[in-house]
Image: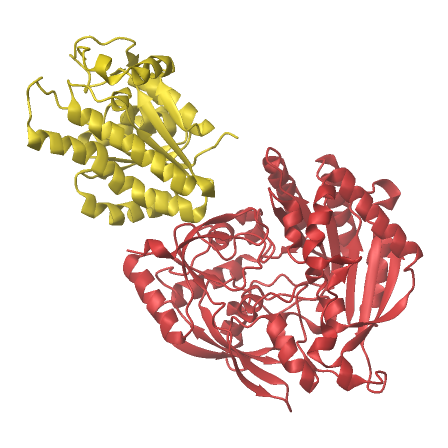
Chain colours: A red, B yellow
């Protein structure tokens, strides 16, 4: 019997999905094995959890053991000459970049928040604003140690066993616990990037400028104002950035200090910890419509064409400017729908998505566009195309309509040969998720699951939903 | 704000108000764990819920509320099987007939074990769980009989008064976390417990009682008399000075 003392409410980051789980926080390999043993004896499933940054139900399962790996956060080895680092899964990107920066290195792929964990980044095979240029997080992993539900430990190397490697990376914690990851960092000569902002008056221009920029700039990200209709539909702002070349930064030793990267304490003269309270009264359709409009016009006038320098952290971790910004969506929380669509169909699909949002009277409060490339991950979301991430508030009484909207958009994505992002998902029906892959991909994952976890100990609400358990 | 429940646990589910609560919740699409001693009665509830449709499901668990030792493990099993727990109702209760001059300690203590100790055994883990998760509804089926100490049934009155006080204390403990603790005080309900008793009035069916109880629990009221007219009656009875009350033939 699991101890009632372990019972906690375990929620998704978006504060929409959550359940009661028996939370264990191991700090060692032996601790992990003990938990697996206890779970097997009690025939209770185990859901893996990193930093809890997945928006939906990826790191939770009702009445199950939740293995929270955040205490396994040691840096095990670091070679400042080669930039190769060995880490435990609970190390956050915040800890990682602050550790390697001083030696002139940077994680080659980072998420929009620095609070994600290395284990979570591998389990979801996350991407950053440089997906076209650098691929996914998993592409910079050389090897990892994997503990399966029977307690067995194996080292999986990309070069020796690419099939298992690429199946585990991106398998949202269904195959085993990564207890050590070896990552290759990227060499940098400055703590700054050179960035440029450009406005696009419509969706077609936004996609064209993004595509043109992808080979000139390492980082390319677009923000979409999802409120306008008609010819202004899909208007937005693009931000490009590149690392500085040797010699461009007059004081590299200064900019490579972790303290020099710290995000500003105040935003618009307000303590950033209080910002969400200021924004919350405007978190409704009229309010967000005006905020989006204001952002677009200020970008299109004051910021248009501006070239400026920023620290890596300032450019990379936009989601950390306003701590706890998700609270603006309380009490209902938020979901995000991020779909990946091939280049030739992206404009039509995204146009239909934005129009569907208007028709359903559910305009997205935030929209983000990125350019992607295919990856080797078995259940990867990468393809040669674009992704559009749309944030929706969840409001009591309108939830079913929102879920129907997500379904409608997802059906269109599948028809276009697109993909979805498990880290963000909370609402896509399993049959549509599976239909976004070739049949043999899902079969291969399930076969590997049967081989590595024959008793199906590792389960999450997301896994049950998407894989149809 | 009204509450919706997807999962519920009814202790004392085989007959009377408990069985009626199971049927109503299952008919509303709820997954209900039904705990009682009599497996045949539980099986009838499972079959009945299935036949009635409504989308709900009844999961039967045979257990004796006098066995407090077995509760923690069974409680954990039930929450695992249900996949969560939103509502717990303690409906188990007995009222042994006692003669006016009868002092049968064994019989009296058994009443306390079923009506009060059993409630403590089942509602303690529920309160601990709901308090930690900061959500959930606990309902205890007390009685109007618990409002005064009648000469005719000293221990039954005591068991229900104890239950009321225990529920109030739970409410004071976990109410601050958003957990609802509802005390239900039914009057005369047409069940096996009351059948054949003299002097019954305002008799309502178990199904009607269950309907009102769920309505009150959804609203999260603190104390509800069922039916509501008992509130006024009991206000008068509770206000009655002791020297007058002891002269009444009740």
Residue lying farthest bottom? A81
Q: Is B233 above or below relative to B159?
A: above
Q: Does residue A428 appear to the left or right of B45 in the view shown?
A: right
Residue at image x 33%, y 61%?
A39
The reply, left or right, for residue A222 in relation to residue A108 is: right
Q: Position of residue A403 (x, y in %)?
A: 60, 40
Q: Is residue A285 left or right of B97 when viewed as pictured?
A: right
Q: Where is residue A240, by image quadrant? A: bottom right
Front residue of this view, candidates B155 and B66? B155
Percent across and percent down for residue A181 are: 53, 77
Name the residue nearer the viewer: B55 or A286. Answer: A286
Residue at the image point whose x is 42% and y is 78% from the top: A154
- Above-or-below relation of B202 to A92: above
| Quarter occupied by the C terminus of chain B | top left
User: Does the image show residue B146?
Assistant: yes
Horizontal and vertical percent for residue B148?
25, 21
């Amino acid at each position: 019997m699991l101890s009632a003392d372990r019972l906690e409410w375990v929620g998704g980051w978006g504060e929409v999905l959550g359940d009661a789980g028996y939370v264990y926080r191991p700090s060692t390999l032996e601790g992990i094995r003990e938990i697996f043993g206890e779970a097997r004896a009690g025939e209770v499933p185990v859901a893996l959890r990193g930093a809890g940054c997945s928006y939906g139900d990826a790191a939770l399962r009702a009445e199950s053991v939740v293995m929270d790996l955040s205490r396994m956060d040691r840096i095990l080895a670091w070679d400042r000459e080669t930039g190769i680092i060995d880490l435990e899964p609970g190390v956050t990107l915040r800890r990682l970049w602050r550790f390697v920066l001083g030696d002139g290195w940077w994680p080659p792929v980072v998420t929009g928040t620095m609070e994600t964990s290395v284990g979570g980044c591998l389990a979801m095979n996350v991407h950053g604003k440089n997906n076209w240029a650098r691929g996914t997080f998993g592409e910079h992993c050389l090897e990892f140690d994997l503990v399966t539900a029977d307690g067995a430990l194996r080292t999986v190397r990309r070069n020796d066993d690419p099939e298992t490697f690429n199946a585990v990376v991106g398998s949202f914690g269904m195959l085993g616990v990564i207890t050590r990851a070896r990552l290759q960092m990227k060499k940098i000569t400055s703590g700054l990037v050179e960035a440029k902002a450009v406005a696009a008056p419509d969706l077609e221009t936004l996609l064209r400028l993004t595509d043109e920029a992808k080979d000139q700039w390492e980082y390319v990200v677009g923000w979409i104002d999802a409120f306008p209709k008609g010819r202004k539909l899909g208007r937005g702002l693009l931000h490009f950035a590149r690392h500085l070349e040797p010699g461009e930064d007059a004081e590299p030793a200064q900019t490579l200090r972790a303290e020099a990267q710290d995000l500003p304490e105040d935003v618009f003269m307000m303590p950033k910890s209080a910002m969400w309270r200021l924004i919350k009264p405007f978190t409704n359709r009229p309010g967000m419509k005006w905020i989006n409009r204001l952002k677009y016009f200020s970008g299109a006038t004051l910021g248009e064409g501006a070239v400026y320098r920023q620290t890596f952290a300032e450019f990379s971790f936009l989601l950390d400017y306003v701590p706890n910004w998700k609270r603006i969506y309380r009490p209902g929380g938020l979901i995000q729908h991020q779909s990946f669509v091939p280049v030739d169909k992206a404009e039509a699909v995204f146009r239909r998505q934005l129009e569907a949002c208007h028709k359903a009277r559910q305009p997205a409060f935030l929209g983000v566009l990125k350019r992607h490339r295919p990856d080797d991950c078995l259940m990867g979301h990468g393809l040669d195309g674009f992704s559009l991430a749309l944030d929706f508030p969840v409001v009591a009484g309108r939830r079913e309509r929102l879920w129907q909207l997500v379904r409608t958009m997802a059906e269109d994505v599948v028809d276009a040969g697109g993909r979805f992002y498990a880290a963000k998902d909370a609402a896509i029906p399993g049959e549509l998720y599976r239909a976004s892959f070739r049949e043999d991909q899902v079969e291969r994952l399930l076969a590997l699951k049967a081989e590595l976890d024959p008793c199906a100990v590792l389960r999450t609400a997301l896994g049950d939903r998407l894989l149809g358990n | 704000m009204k509450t919706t429940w997807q999962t519920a646990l009814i202790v004392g589910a085989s007959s009377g108000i408990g069985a009626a609560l199971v049927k109503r919740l299952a008919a509303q699409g709820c997954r209900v764990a039904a705990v009682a001693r009599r497996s045949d009665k539980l099986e009838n509830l499972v079959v009945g819920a299935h036949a009635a449709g409504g989308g709900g499901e009844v999961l039967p668990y045979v257990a004796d509320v006098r066995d407090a030792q077995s509760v923690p493990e069974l409680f954990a099993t039930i929450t695992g099987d249900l996949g969560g727990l939103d509502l717990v109702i303690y409906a188990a209760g007995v009222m042994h007939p006692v003669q006016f001059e009868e002092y049968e300690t064994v019989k009296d203590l058994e009443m306390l074990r079923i009506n009060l100790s059993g409630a403590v055994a089942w509602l303690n883990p529920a309160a601990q769980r709901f308090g930690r998760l900061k959500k959930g509804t606990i309902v205890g089926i007390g009685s109007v009989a618990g409002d005064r100490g009648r000469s005719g049934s000293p221990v039954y009155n005591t068991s229900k008064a104890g239950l009321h006080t225990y529920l109030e204390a739970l409410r004071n403990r976990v109410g601050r976390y958003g957990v609802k603790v509802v005390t239900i005080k039914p009057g005369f309900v047409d069940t096996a417990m009351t059948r054949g008793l003299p002097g019954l009035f305002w008799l309502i069916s178990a199904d009607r009682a269950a309907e009102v109880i769920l309505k009150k629990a959804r609203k999260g009221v603190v104390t509800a008399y069922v039916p509501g007219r008992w509130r006024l009656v009991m206000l008068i009875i509770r206000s009655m000075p002791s020297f007058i009350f002891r002269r009444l033939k009740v």
